[in-house]
Image (spheres, coloured by chain):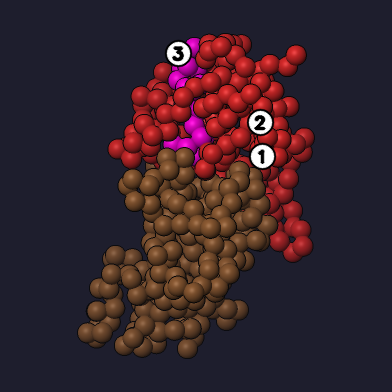
Chain colours: A brown, B red
Amino acid sequence: MSETIEKALGDDRVAMTRRLAGDIADGWYVNLGVGMPTKVADMIDDGREVMFHSENGILGMGPTPAEDEIDPWLVNAGKKAVSLTPGAALFHHADSFAMIRGGHIDLCVLGGYEVAENGDLANWTTPSGDILPAVGGAMDLAVGAKRVWVLMQHTTRDGAAKLVRRCTYPLTAPAAVDRVYTELGTFAVTEEGFRVLTLADGVSLADVQARTDAPIHG
Amino acid sequence: MIDKRVADLAAALEGISDGAVVMIGGFGAVGQPDALVDALAELGPRELTIIANNAGWSAETGIPRLMDLGLVRKIICSFPKGSTVFKDLFTAGKIELELVPQGTLAERIRCGGAGIPAFYTATAAGTRLAEGKEVRTFRGRECVMEEALTADVALVEAWQADRWGNLVFRGSGRNFNPIMAMAAELTIVQAHQFANELDPNVIVTPGIFVNRVVQVDSRVEKLLAAQKAS
């Protein structure tokens, strides 16, 4: 393993999140999944107006408010206090998921256990079945958003591939993913399988292939 | 004269019987009809089926309180994580779970209120949650049939209500409340404030969907703190 790769793998995920945020276009309506994807909201450059959607009925979600500015009647899908931006709107759950299922949300960013080369996404439960299964809005978002980008580490903590030929984890949705952002690069899901859009600094195609179960096209 | 206001929680919950299907609004701490749920726990009807997004958090209050008292037979929800009461009952096989994707849950409830018996959606097609469901292809896309949900009772929280049962909400407090109000035979509302007359331009839930309204000061700040602590 080259030193650069070690550094890339040891990175604190900021770079990959920033890379994804940089690809979000001005004017998009975007839903961010819980966990790492929520950090995308803090990395949108000034000058671009992006409206963040929350499943529980918010368009125009702003940053976490200061302790003394918290409105207890306003939480996001992760049940955390949020603020509203100018132009925000509030609505009920059926309208919120009409936005999602009806293809009105430009982009959804989700985490993932596995993404297959045909775009299959597994991100809601483990093969043995969690003791307590929970799905939330993941399946609706994966089939409904115009674009689905997965933000995840390239491999598991044990080094197993997460970009795979076929998912071994239970599916969230078949053929749902458009792009995968990892610490090694950005990869598009195409008819031929995974194709490199960007490689992280100092990372080669061979480095990526060594950590990927499915073929990676340059 | 139409006046849906009732004096107290006991009057609000009158007539809920064993075996009732009960929808409970709220998402996180916001929009929870917490006083109604706690009063229902006191009332103690058994063999309830609960329809809600979550299974709650603390055993002291809300849905876990109902479960802890052994009043709940089944829950239909999208995200049951967070409550140790539910987890323990579920792993012991003492409570039934129907896990539904969140948007499908919302649409099943909306359809229940709108008189639509079932619908097709691509959500969950090709996954474990579609097992046993009718599948059809529309516009080249595989879809599963989902049946509408209705209930005997909906417990709803609103920011303001008037005597006609018209409701307005605050912040993210709408969530499942307006659609649950539509889908139940008996809709009972806990409102933070009574208003003499609400502006028709801003009403979210028209009073036709509401049967009873009781005024209860919101405890959302306490609920948030409890949720944060868990």
- Residue drawn at x 60%, y 66% is A106
Q: Residue furthest left?
A: A3
Over which residues does the magenta segment extend? B26-43
What amino acid does circle 3 point to?
Glu
Q: Which quadrant of the figure contains the C terminus of chain B?
A: top left
Q: On the image, numbered disc 3 is attached to which residue?
A: B42
Q: Nearer the viewer, residue B220 or A201?
A: B220
Q: State the image coordinates of residue A31 (x, y, percent, origin top left).
A: 52, 59
Q: Work out whether residue B77 can be spotted.
A: no
Tell me whether the residue at label 2 lies in contact with that at label 1, contact meaning CB atoms closer than 8 angstroms: yes
> What's the chain of the residue with tag 1?
B
* Residue B27 highlighted magenta (yes or no): yes
- Residue drawn at x 32%, y 70% is A13
Question: How packed is label 1: few (under 14 Cα within 10 Å), some, or many (20 or more)?
Answer: few
Q: Work out whether residue B164 can be spotted.
A: yes
Mark number, residue B198: 2
**Distance of mark 2 from mark 3, alpha carbons?**
32 Å
* Residue A192 highlighted magenta (yes or no): no
Q: On the image, numbered disc 1 is attached to which residue?
A: B202
> What's the chain of the residue with tag 2?
B
